[in-house]
Amino acid sequence: MTESRSTSTRGRSSGFIGPNGAGKTTAFNVITRLYTPNEGVVEFAGANLLKAPVHGIVSRGIARTFQNVELFKTMTVLDNVLVGAHTRDRAGEPEALEAIDYVGLAGVAGRPVAGLPFGTLKRVELARALVSEPKLLLLDEPAGGLNHEEVEELGRFIKQIRDDRKLTVLLVEHHMNLVMGISDHVHVLNFGRKIAEGPPAEVRANPAVIEAYLGTEDQGPSGPSSPVPAVEENERNEEKEPDAAA
């Protein structure tokens, strides 16, 4: 990433969009200290996160989900969520069960995550993030693998989470209806540079964004992109995050 500066307002949702390999997941990995940039500052709550140890990010109020679900497959839903509570004093099974119930998974709390549907696994990851009581929640392609009805439900749920828990939400997503529907502000990356930002309607009409990503009605789905760009496998390979559990 080069010459990319973005800010987000507390209690609001911001979306990150851009072509495959644009640097969206890389940005999340820098924020959460999985990657260390050559230069620059990542500031949160008045502190430079780059001076914090990797294991200290969650305790500073930041939690995330991953593009490729990262769970302990042989452990139960409850035990996976308990991992997210390790930074909270005296937090334990009651808090984990509350988070599991909040995401609608109380009925599978005692089941191993191996073999559960993909959409369920994504909710387990979300519960694990929420049990840490974050101030900033990073969601990396939460709609990946979901059908149309599930995406609509997800959009409503993300808004509910933001409002119920007074969170700031950062969202990386290719599903444009989801991004534009829940984001107060949208950032657009292309080849590691920010090319536009602003309210969803303004970004959608930006000529540079249309050329680089959204495309026009005359362009095919694999040109600069169709109005709802498809997720291509090469981004998952290019931006695949390091193995991590929380």
Image (cartoon, grey):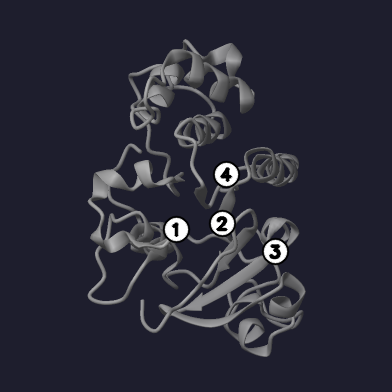
Disc 3 versus disc 4: distance between alpha carbons?
24 Å
- Picture coordinates of residue 84 (x, y %)? 39, 31
Disc 1 versus disc 4: distance between alpha carbons?
33 Å
- Picture coordinates of residue 163 (x, y %)? 70, 44
Disc 3 versus disc 2: distance between alpha carbons?
11 Å
Q: Nearer the viewer, mark 3 or mark 1?
A: 1
Is 73 rendered above or below residue 21? above
* Lower sequence index among marks 2 and 1: 1
User: Would you name the residue on which mark 3 appears?
Assistant: 184
Q: Decide: marks 1, 4 in contact (CB < 8 A)?
A: no
Mark linked to residue 171: 2
Q: Residue at x 44, y 17 (%)?
A: 78
Q: Residue at x 41, y 70 (%)?
A: 23
Disc 3 versus disc 1: distance between alpha carbons?
20 Å
Q: Nearer the viewer, mark 2 or mark 4?
A: 2
State the SS at label 1.
loop
Mark linked to residue 145: 4
* Lower sequence index among marks 3 and 4: 4
User: Would you name the residue on which mark 1 appears?
Assistant: 45
- The amino acid type found where label 2 is placed reads Leu
Foreground residue, 121 or 203? 203
- The amino acid type found where label 4 is placed reads Gly
- The amino acid type found where label 3 is placed reads Asp
State the SS at label 4.
loop
Foreground residue, 12 or 204? 12
Q: Residue at x 56, y 68 (%)?
A: 17
Foreground residue, 126 or 148? 126
* Lower sequence index among marks 3 and 2: 2
Disc 2 versus disc 4: distance between alpha carbons?
16 Å
- Picture coordinates of residue 226 (x, y %)? 67, 72
Is 207 rendered above or below residue 121? below
User: How many dots with numbers?
Assistant: 4
